[in-house]
Image: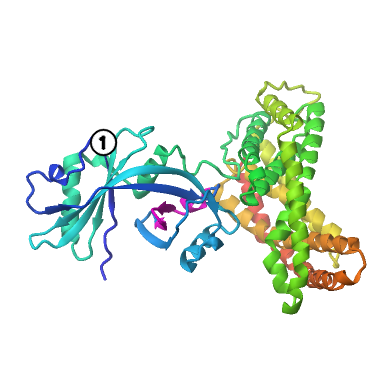
Amino acid sequence: MRAIPSPLFFRLPETSENLSQLFAGNDMFLFKPEQKIKETLHFYDTFDWKTWKANNQVILNGKKLVVYDFKGHYAICSAPFRRVPRSFFPDSIDNKEISAKLGRLAKLRAFMQFGSVETLLQNWRLLDDNRKTVATVEFRRLSNNHQNDGSIFLTLYPVRGYDRFFESAAVRIRQACGNSTEITSKGYYQALMKDAGVTPGNYSSKPSVKLNPRDTILDSAKILQLSALDILSANEEWIPKHIDTEFLHDYRVAVRRIRSILAQCKGVFPPDKLAHYKKAFRELGKRTNNLRDQDVYLLQEKRFMSILPEQMRDFLKPFFTDLLNRQKKELRSFTRYLRSDAYRTLMHEWEHFLRSDISSDPETTPAAKTTTVDFAVLTVGKTWKKVIRHGRNISTVATDTELHALRIDCKKLRYLLEFYASVFPARTLQKVLKQLKTLQNNLGVFVDLSVQQTYLFDYLSSLEADTHAISFSAAIGGLITALHHEREETRQNFHNAFDTFDSDETEALFHALLKKSR
């Protein structure tokens, strides 16, 4: 079956919503206008624009939530939605199709309302001689009048079986308005959101700076640190609102990136400043540990419940109630710190330092004038060899301490590869990252299970011995046992995961990566 053509989009400045003007002198079509209506469009996406980056758009139009596909501009799925929330999670939607679709796009993030536009809409039907509808046209005028120029957006929709009429109508619109008025589906929504003061895709949790390989590492390190600081700033105002857990997660990752760069900056930044900021950001990271742990445990509630026999699950509910109360208290404490003079002073002084003209002293900062590409090759090479050396020295038993230390080494290597991504060959880098990810996944699961088990054991030890706590303690104990079995299974898989990374293939990729970058 022949595919139906995709709709076409046009931006028509200073044009009347009257098809007879566009088709003047053309007797191929008859026109039937429908009633003009006011329509408010509310735009939703995750904070990191997951749907937009997947070429989708989530819009609340009237009382219907619709997910559009940019490539063919069709509604992938829709569902009744009788509220206009500031944010929502996919699993709060009763419609299983749209809930599943949004859930696949964003597993942990909430969908937030980024903006709204008021529009005046009129639809026209294009009729043939037999008065059959052969195409439809949508005129949409923006009503906000604060960022638009009076433009009208025209969308030409096909009707199955009438491709010839659709194509003829498209030719006529291009002739009357000019080819430059035609825009893409994505451009159409981008223009609508611009009127709402929204710039889609303006946030990413990963550094996206392009470094000049021949710049000094001092200049590049400052650029990388400012990029990480931007991520801190973007998330800090949202953490207290607790819309979803990923604001804190991205914030913590940005802190770790800053610390990782500082760890590599011996001989690049002045020693006194380096020591000061290494300590400051280490303390900042520690302030978020408890809150992040609590977030993770609360996200695991359904999984923890499923691990236990059904008759024991209710006994675990007091644990999550207590955990939620602790989380709220911890969030209030960290919020106070984010709003404190001490925090603002740290961020201000850090930014001022990065933007200042840092002098290079051959005695105290001998590496400052090293080119970025040479520094990248040196530090990545050393860190990769450290991962290999430490991994090969891990005993057959693979103790908790050994695996935890190796995980930290792997994180440092991944951060360095991401920092210098613009310096390395892209295709080779992606292959290296893929090899590293498999090992990191194994280590990450192991360490997470270890932390969860330890937390639960300490929690259990703190309970007072009384008859009311027996069933509760039994549920916690059962959960600890189940997590222990998962952890030991992951431990057994470690050596296979490491051997895959410590292979001739991976070694060849690293050599190619470092050699080509010189």
**Range drawn in magenta:** 49-68
Is 5 placed left or right of 327 in the picture? Answer: left
Q: Quadrant of the N terminus?
A: bottom left
Packing grade of label 1 (10 A; few <14, some 14-19, many >=20) is few
Residue 13 % position (x, y): 26, 36
| 63 magenta-colored | yes
| Residue placed furthest toward the right | 465
Is 311 placed left or right of 459 in the picture? Answer: left
Residue 185 % position (x, y): 35, 49
The residue sitting at 16% across, 55% down in the picture is 126
Q: Nearer the viewer, residue 489 or 138?
A: 138
| 384 magenta-colored | no
Is 26 placed left or right of 189 in the picture? Answer: left
Residue 284 % position (x, y): 77, 39
Kind of residue sitting beneath label 1? Pro
**From this viewpoint, is residue 394 visible?**
no
Relative to 196, residue 300 above or below: below
**From this viewpoint, is residue 360 visible?**
yes
Q: Quadrant of residue 498?
A: bottom right
Q: Nearer the viewer, residue 509 or 58?
A: 58
Relative to 157, residue 20 above or below: above
Q: Nearer the viewer, residue 101 or 501?
A: 101
Residue 307 % position (x, y): 73, 73
SS of the residue under disc 1: loop
Q: Quadrant of the C terminus?
A: top right
Q: Quadrant of residue 363?
A: top right
The residue sitting at 71% across, 55% down in the picture is 295
Please count the marks in the image.
1
Residue annotated with mark 1: 13
The residue sitting at 15% across, 43% down in the picture is 22
